[in-house]
Image (tube, grey):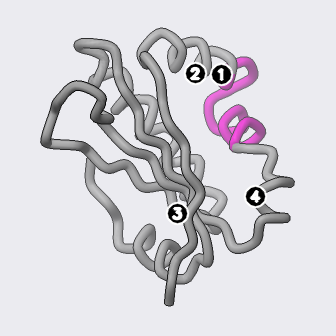
């Protein structure tokens, strides 16, 4: 998946980011990629958060297949963030968020999340 320059600008300017390392079920990458492309459009429409997808080219046991990164500036912002549901449904229609979450549960085994700070 391609990383756009605007994502790096948001990433470099942000104070913190949340990272998910995701273990996909076998042969589900194509579905994951399609969902991420939709999410990318949602975050681009908001224009305030980087949404970065990183692929792991080294596959092995207990290693994530892909990683997702979102940026934020304060922990208060992170805590109050309702997520992209409203904007997702604005772009893709009523009920589309639940369909996306059902698909998410069908394609992943598990994920690990971390919150990190950018040191500037």
Vertical placement of residue 120 versus 14, above or below: below
115 sits to left or right of 74: left
Q: In this figure, which residue is indicated by the disc labeled 4?
A: 78
Mark earlier in primary sequence (4, 2): 4
Q: CA distance from mark 3 to mark 1?
A: 22 Å
Task: Tell me, yes or no, whether the highlighted magenta stretch contains residue 85.
Answer: yes
Q: In this figure, which residue is indicated by the disc labeled 1?
A: 96
Nearest the eye: 40 or 110: 110
- Which of the two marks, 3 or 4, is nearer to us in this view? 4
Disc 4 residue crowd, few under 14, some 14–19, many 20+, Cα 10 Å: some
Vertical placement of residue 101 versus 67, above or below: above
Q: CA distance from mark 2 to mark 1?
A: 6 Å
Q: Position of residue 9 (x, y in %)?
A: 45, 79
Q: In this figure, which residue is indicated by the disc labeled 3?
A: 50
Q: Quadrant of residue 6?
A: bottom left
Nearest the eye: 89 or 21: 21
Disc 1 residue crowd, few under 14, some 14–19, many 20+, Cα 10 Å: some
Report helix, strand or loop for mark 1: helix
Provide the residue span drawn in magenta: 84-97
Mark earlier in primary sequence (3, 1): 3
- Which of the two marks, 2 or 1, is nearer to us in this view? 2
Q: CA distance from mark 1 to mark 4?
A: 23 Å
Report helix, strand or loop for mark 2: helix
Q: CA distance from mark 4 to mark 2?
A: 22 Å
Q: Position of residue 99 (x, y in %)?
A: 61, 15
- Predominant secondary structure in magenta? helix
Report helix, strand or loop for mark 4: helix
Q: CA distance from mark 3 to mark 2?
A: 20 Å
Mark earlier in primary sequence (3, 4): 3
């Amino acid at each position: 998946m391609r990383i756009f320059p605007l994502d790096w600008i948001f990433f470099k300017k942000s104070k913190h980011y949340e990272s998910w390392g995701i273990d996909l079920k076998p042969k589900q990458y194509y579905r994951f990629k399609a969902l991420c492309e939709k999410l990318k459009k949602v975050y681009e429409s908001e224009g305030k958060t980087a949404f970065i997808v990183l692929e792991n080219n080294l596959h092995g046991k207990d290693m994530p297949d892909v990683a997702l990164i979102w940026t934020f500036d304060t922990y208060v912002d992170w805590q109050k963030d309702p997520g992209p549901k409203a904007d997702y449904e604005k772009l893709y229609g009523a009920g589309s968020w639940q369909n996306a979450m059902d698909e998410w549960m069908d394609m992943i085994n598990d994920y690990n999340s971390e919150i990190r700070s950018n040191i500037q």
